[in-house]
């Protein structure tokens, strides 16, 4: 096999799975677009600022404010006072938002499980090991980590390779959520 063909096959595979993930997770979100990612990120990191949520979902600050306004009006998230910055607000899922986030993440997980079901356990482990190496190598910074993990089920990701790579670089998401 030649390099361009292999890259094309991998690119088509990645796009197919990605499109399926977006379609499935969006179908369980209250609206199309980045709402699914917002719910998943807030389950992953309760208390995010609008600035960090904007980075994670790939919207402008103003677009994220409008998204947050809609999700607040639907009773899915709430704004609370920030622990250190009186001007900022921290975002949290409501109990209804947690249910919606769980549904988004379950649909994402189902798509991935179905997409990879053709692989035997050894092949799946090999693919996971390769994906981990690529994730760690391609990680640029804290902000990109939120984009990468925007639809991750954090509870299911023990020993997260993105967190591990950030830690090796001396960056701690817990201390830098609003940096």
Image (cartoon, rainbow, N blue to C red):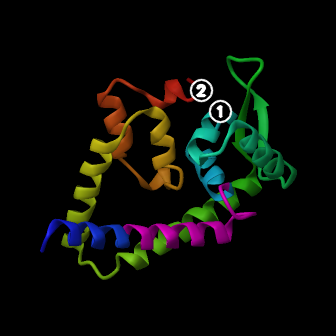
Q: Quadrant of residue 82?
A: top right
Give the residue number, with chain letter if any, for mark 1. Answer: 51
Give the main secondary structure of the magenta stretch.
Answer: helix
Q: Which residues are magenta?
A: 14-34
SS at mark 2 in the image: loop
Dot 1 or dot 2, earlier in sequence: 1
In the picture of the structure, the residue carrying the numbered disc 2 is: 178
Position of residue 91 measured from the top left corner of the image (x, y, whole percent): 71, 38
**For the residues carrying marks 1 and 2, which lies nearer the camera in this image?**
1
Q: In the rendering, which numbered label is found on residue 67?
A: none
- As helix, strand or loop, the secondary structure at mark 1 comes to helix
Task: Please provide percent x and percent y for residue 110.
Answer: 49, 74
Is residue 18 visible in this depiction of the protein? yes
Q: Please tell me which residue is depicted at 79% across the width and 51% down the height of the picture.
A: 71
Q: Please, is residue 15 above or below residue 120 in the view?
A: above
Residues marked 1 and 2 touching at CB (< 8 Å) = yes
Q: CA distance from mark 1 to mark 2?
A: 7 Å
Q: Residue at x 25, y 64 (%)?
A: 127
């Amino acid at each position: 096999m030649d390099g361009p063909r292999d890259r094309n096959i991998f690119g088509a595979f990645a796009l197919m799975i990605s499109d399926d993930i977006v379609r499935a997770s969006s179908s369980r979100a209250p609206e199309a677009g980045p709402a699914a990612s917002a719910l998943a990120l807030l389950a992953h990191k309760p208390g995010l600022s609008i600035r960090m949520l904007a980075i994670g979902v790939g919207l402008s600050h103003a677009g994220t404010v409008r998204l947050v306004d809609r999700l607040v009006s639907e009773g899915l998230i709430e704004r609370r006072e920030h622990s250190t910055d009186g001007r900022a607000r921290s975002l949290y899922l409501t109990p209804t938002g947690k249910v919606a986030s769980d549904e988004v993440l379950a649909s994402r997980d189902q798509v991935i499980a179905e997409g990879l079901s053709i692989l035997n356990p050894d092949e799946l482990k090999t693919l996971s090991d390769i994906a981990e190496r690529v994730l760690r190598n391609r990680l640029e910074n804290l902000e990109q980590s939120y984009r990468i993990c925007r639809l991750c089920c954090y509870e299911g990701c023990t020993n997260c390779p993105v967190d591990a790579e950030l830690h090796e670089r001396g960056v701690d998401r817990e201390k830098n959520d609003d940096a």
